[in-house]
Image (tube, coloured by chain):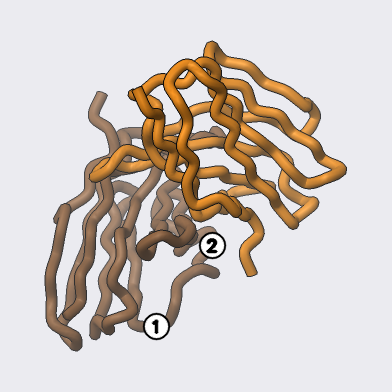
Amino acid sequence: EAGVTQFPSHSVIEKGQTVTLRCDPISGHDNLYWYRRVMGKEIKFLLHFVKESKQDESGMPNNRFLAERTGGTYSTLKVQPAELEDSGVYFCASSQGGRELFFGEGSRLTVL
Amino acid sequence: DQQVKQNSPSLSVQEGRISILNCDYTNSMFDYFLWYKKYPAEGPTFLISISSIKDKNEDGRFTVFLNKSAKHLSLHIVPSQPGDSAVYFCAATGGFKTIFGAGTRLFVKA
Protein backbone atom coordinates (compact mmCIF):
# COMPACT_ATOMS: atom_id res chain seq x y z
CA GLU A 1 0.00 0.00 0.00
CA ALA A 2 1.38 3.39 -1.02
CA GLY A 3 2.01 5.88 1.75
CA VAL A 4 1.39 9.60 1.75
CA THR A 5 3.25 11.21 -1.12
CA GLN A 6 4.19 14.85 -1.44
CA PHE A 7 5.51 16.87 -4.36
CA PRO A 8 7.86 18.61 -4.80
CA SER A 9 10.36 17.43 -2.22
CA HIS A 10 12.14 20.78 -2.39
CA SER A 11 11.22 24.10 -3.94
CA VAL A 12 13.34 27.25 -4.08
CA ILE A 13 11.53 30.42 -5.14
CA GLU A 14 11.98 34.16 -5.00
CA LYS A 15 9.96 36.33 -2.67
CA GLY A 16 6.73 37.31 -4.38
CA GLN A 17 6.48 34.18 -6.50
CA THR A 18 3.86 31.47 -6.22
CA VAL A 19 4.35 27.86 -5.18
CA THR A 20 1.90 24.99 -5.14
CA LEU A 21 2.53 21.93 -3.01
CA ARG A 22 0.69 18.70 -3.62
CA CYS A 23 -0.24 15.85 -1.31
CA ASP A 24 -1.67 12.45 -2.18
CA PRO A 25 -2.99 10.78 0.97
CA ILE A 26 -3.21 7.07 1.60
CA SER A 27 -6.06 5.69 -0.47
CA GLY A 28 -9.30 5.64 1.48
CA HIS A 29 -8.17 8.11 4.13
CA ASP A 30 -10.86 10.76 4.52
CA ASN A 31 -8.83 12.94 6.87
CA LEU A 32 -6.02 15.03 5.42
CA TYR A 33 -3.88 17.46 7.36
CA TRP A 34 -1.30 20.08 6.49
CA TYR A 35 1.44 20.98 8.96
CA ARG A 36 4.51 23.18 8.75
CA ARG A 37 7.82 23.01 10.59
CA VAL A 38 10.19 25.93 10.70
CA MET A 39 13.75 24.95 11.61
CA GLY A 40 13.94 23.73 15.21
CA LYS A 41 10.37 24.67 16.04
CA GLU A 42 7.24 22.64 16.59
CA ILE A 43 5.33 20.89 13.81
CA LYS A 44 2.56 23.44 13.54
CA PHE A 45 -0.98 22.59 12.47
CA LEU A 46 -2.26 24.46 9.42
CA LEU A 47 -5.55 22.84 8.47
CA HIS A 48 -7.63 19.69 8.34
CA PHE A 49 -9.84 18.32 5.57
CA VAL A 50 -12.51 15.71 5.97
CA LYS A 51 -13.01 14.48 2.44
CA GLU A 52 -13.32 17.68 0.39
CA SER A 53 -14.51 19.90 3.26
CA LYS A 54 -12.32 22.07 5.47
CA GLN A 55 -12.93 20.87 9.03
CA ASP A 56 -10.51 23.26 10.68
CA GLU A 57 -8.33 25.91 9.05
CA SER A 58 -7.47 27.78 12.23
CA GLY A 59 -3.74 27.32 11.70
CA MET A 60 -3.51 28.95 8.28
CA PRO A 61 -1.17 31.94 8.72
CA ASN A 62 -2.96 34.40 6.44
CA ASN A 63 -4.84 34.72 3.19
CA ARG A 64 -1.71 34.16 1.12
CA PHE A 65 -2.23 30.48 1.81
CA LEU A 66 -4.94 28.56 -0.03
CA ALA A 67 -5.63 24.86 0.42
CA GLU A 68 -7.92 22.75 -1.68
CA ARG A 69 -8.90 19.12 -1.82
CA THR A 70 -10.64 18.34 -5.03
CA GLY A 71 -13.08 15.45 -4.87
CA GLY A 72 -11.76 14.42 -1.51
CA THR A 73 -8.63 12.88 -2.98
CA TYR A 74 -5.36 14.78 -3.35
CA SER A 75 -4.81 18.20 -1.85
CA THR A 76 -2.87 21.28 -2.89
CA LEU A 77 -1.48 24.08 -0.78
CA LYS A 78 -0.75 27.27 -2.67
CA VAL A 79 1.30 30.14 -1.30
CA GLN A 80 0.83 33.37 -3.24
CA PRO A 81 2.77 35.61 -3.01
CA ALA A 82 5.48 33.85 -1.01
CA GLU A 83 7.31 35.72 1.75
CA LEU A 84 10.63 34.93 3.44
CA GLU A 85 8.89 33.73 6.62
CA ASP A 86 7.03 31.06 4.64
CA SER A 87 10.21 29.01 4.38
CA GLY A 88 10.04 25.67 6.15
CA VAL A 89 9.05 22.06 5.66
CA TYR A 90 5.40 21.47 4.84
CA PHE A 91 4.13 18.09 5.93
CA CYS A 92 0.96 16.41 4.80
CA ALA A 93 -0.61 13.65 6.87
CA SER A 94 -3.67 11.47 6.50
CA SER A 95 -5.75 9.21 8.69
CA GLN A 96 -8.93 7.20 8.58
CA GLY A 97 -10.59 8.17 11.83
CA GLY A 98 -7.86 6.91 14.12
CA ARG A 99 -5.65 9.09 16.29
CA GLU A 100 -2.44 8.05 14.51
CA LEU A 101 -1.38 10.24 11.60
CA PHE A 102 0.54 8.95 8.60
CA PHE A 103 2.95 11.56 7.30
CA GLY A 104 4.53 12.19 3.95
CA GLU A 105 8.21 13.01 3.63
CA GLY A 106 7.49 16.71 3.45
CA SER A 107 8.04 19.50 0.94
CA ARG A 108 10.86 21.84 1.84
CA LEU A 109 10.15 25.40 0.76
CA THR A 110 12.92 27.96 0.57
CA VAL A 111 11.93 31.55 -0.19
CA LEU A 112 14.84 33.80 -1.15
CA ASP B 1 1.05 29.82 22.93
CA GLN B 2 2.65 26.39 22.78
CA GLN B 3 0.35 23.77 24.25
CA VAL B 4 2.87 20.92 23.99
CA LYS B 5 6.39 21.62 25.19
CA GLN B 6 9.56 19.62 24.88
CA ASN B 7 12.11 21.62 26.82
CA SER B 8 15.16 19.56 25.93
CA PRO B 9 16.30 20.24 22.35
CA SER B 10 18.75 17.35 22.50
CA LEU B 11 19.80 14.34 24.55
CA SER B 12 22.90 12.18 24.31
CA VAL B 13 22.92 8.64 25.69
CA GLN B 14 25.35 5.74 25.64
CA GLU B 15 24.26 2.61 23.78
CA GLY B 16 22.59 0.13 26.12
CA ARG B 17 21.54 2.76 28.64
CA ILE B 18 18.09 4.25 29.18
CA SER B 19 16.88 7.28 27.20
CA ILE B 20 14.20 9.41 28.86
CA LEU B 21 12.46 12.05 26.78
CA ASN B 22 10.09 14.46 28.49
CA CYS B 23 7.03 16.40 27.42
CA ASP B 24 4.69 18.82 29.15
CA TYR B 25 1.28 20.00 28.03
CA THR B 26 -1.04 22.75 29.14
CA ASN B 27 -4.47 21.87 27.73
CA SER B 28 -6.47 19.63 30.09
CA MET B 29 -8.82 18.75 27.19
CA PHE B 30 -6.16 16.55 25.59
CA ASP B 31 -7.19 12.92 26.03
CA TYR B 32 -4.69 11.07 23.87
CA PHE B 33 -0.93 11.40 23.58
CA LEU B 34 1.48 10.11 20.99
CA TRP B 35 5.20 9.96 20.28
CA TYR B 36 6.54 10.17 16.75
CA LYS B 37 10.04 9.48 15.54
CA LYS B 38 11.64 11.35 12.67
CA TYR B 39 14.78 10.58 10.68
CA PRO B 40 16.39 13.26 8.46
CA ALA B 41 14.61 13.89 5.16
CA GLU B 42 11.70 11.69 6.22
CA GLY B 43 8.29 12.41 7.67
CA PRO B 44 7.46 11.64 11.31
CA THR B 45 6.36 8.07 11.97
CA PHE B 46 4.15 6.92 14.80
CA LEU B 47 5.97 5.19 17.64
CA ILE B 48 3.71 4.70 20.66
CA SER B 49 0.64 6.27 22.23
CA ILE B 50 -1.29 6.42 25.47
CA SER B 51 -4.85 7.28 26.38
CA SER B 52 -5.55 9.66 29.24
CA ILE B 53 -7.28 6.85 31.14
CA LYS B 54 -3.98 5.02 31.48
CA ASP B 55 -0.71 5.95 33.13
CA LYS B 56 1.60 3.58 31.29
CA ASN B 57 1.85 1.88 27.93
CA GLU B 58 4.64 -0.44 26.89
CA ASP B 59 5.72 -1.71 23.48
CA GLY B 60 8.97 -3.63 23.41
CA ARG B 61 11.83 -1.30 24.33
CA PHE B 62 9.52 1.72 24.41
CA THR B 63 7.37 2.78 27.37
CA VAL B 64 5.31 5.92 27.70
CA PHE B 65 4.31 7.23 31.12
CA LEU B 66 1.53 9.75 31.69
CA ASN B 67 1.12 11.89 34.80
CA LYS B 68 -2.18 13.72 34.30
CA SER B 69 -2.02 15.74 37.48
CA ALA B 70 1.34 17.15 36.43
CA LYS B 71 0.36 17.33 32.75
CA HIS B 72 3.56 15.50 31.95
CA LEU B 73 4.49 12.50 29.87
CA SER B 74 7.73 10.77 29.19
CA LEU B 75 9.12 8.24 26.74
CA HIS B 76 11.58 5.65 28.02
CA ILE B 77 13.75 3.67 25.63
CA VAL B 78 15.54 0.70 27.16
CA PRO B 79 18.07 -0.35 26.06
CA SER B 80 18.96 2.48 23.70
CA GLN B 81 20.43 1.53 20.35
CA PRO B 82 22.34 3.62 17.77
CA GLY B 83 19.42 3.20 15.36
CA ASP B 84 17.24 5.08 17.86
CA SER B 85 19.13 8.27 17.02
CA ALA B 86 16.43 10.55 15.60
CA VAL B 87 14.18 13.46 16.52
CA TYR B 88 11.31 12.48 18.80
CA PHE B 89 8.10 14.52 18.78
CA CYS B 90 5.54 14.49 21.52
CA ALA B 91 1.96 15.08 20.34
CA ALA B 92 -1.42 15.49 21.98
CA THR B 93 -4.98 15.50 20.76
CA GLY B 94 -8.44 16.11 22.19
CA GLY B 95 -10.38 15.77 18.97
CA PHE B 96 -9.51 16.13 15.33
CA LYS B 97 -6.49 18.39 15.69
CA THR B 98 -3.14 16.98 16.85
CA ILE B 99 -0.68 19.41 18.45
CA PHE B 100 3.04 18.69 18.31
CA GLY B 101 6.00 19.78 20.36
CA ALA B 102 9.28 21.08 18.97
CA GLY B 103 11.03 17.74 19.22
CA THR B 104 14.04 16.34 21.09
CA ARG B 105 17.01 15.13 19.10
CA LEU B 106 18.33 11.90 20.58
CA PHE B 107 21.92 10.81 19.98
CA VAL B 108 22.76 7.24 20.97
CA LYS B 109 26.52 6.74 21.06
CA ALA B 110 27.96 3.33 20.28
Identify by letter the chain in orange.
B
Labelled pair 1, 2 in contact (Cβ < 8 Å): no
Q: Secondary structure at mark 1?
A: loop
* Amino acid identity at mark 1: Asn
Which quarter of the picture shows residue A56? Answer: bottom right
Residue for point 58% across, 37% down: B21
Observer-nearest of A12 and A101? A12
Q: Position of residue A71 (x, y in %)?
A: 31, 52
Residue that numbered label 2 is attached to: A56
Indicate which disc, 1 or 2, sits on the residue closer to the N terminus: 2
Packing grade of label 2 (10 A; few <14, some 14-19, many >=20) is some
- State the separation of the CA atoms marked 1 and 2: 15 Å
* Amino acid identity at mark 2: Asp
Residue for point 33% across, 82% down: A64
Residue for point 75% across, 56% down: B27
Q: Secondary structure at mark 2?
A: strand
Residue most extreme to the bottom: A16
Where is A69 relative to B69, above or below? below
Q: Is residue A68 visible?
A: yes
Q: Position of residue A24 (x, y in %)?
A: 25, 45
Q: Position of residue B13 (x, y in %)?
A: 47, 31
Q: Chain of mark 1?
A: A
Packing grade of label 1 (10 A; few <14, some 14-19, many >=20) is few
Identify by letter the chain in brown.
A
Q: Quadrant of the N terminus of chain B?
A: bottom right
Residue that numbered label 1 is attached to: A63
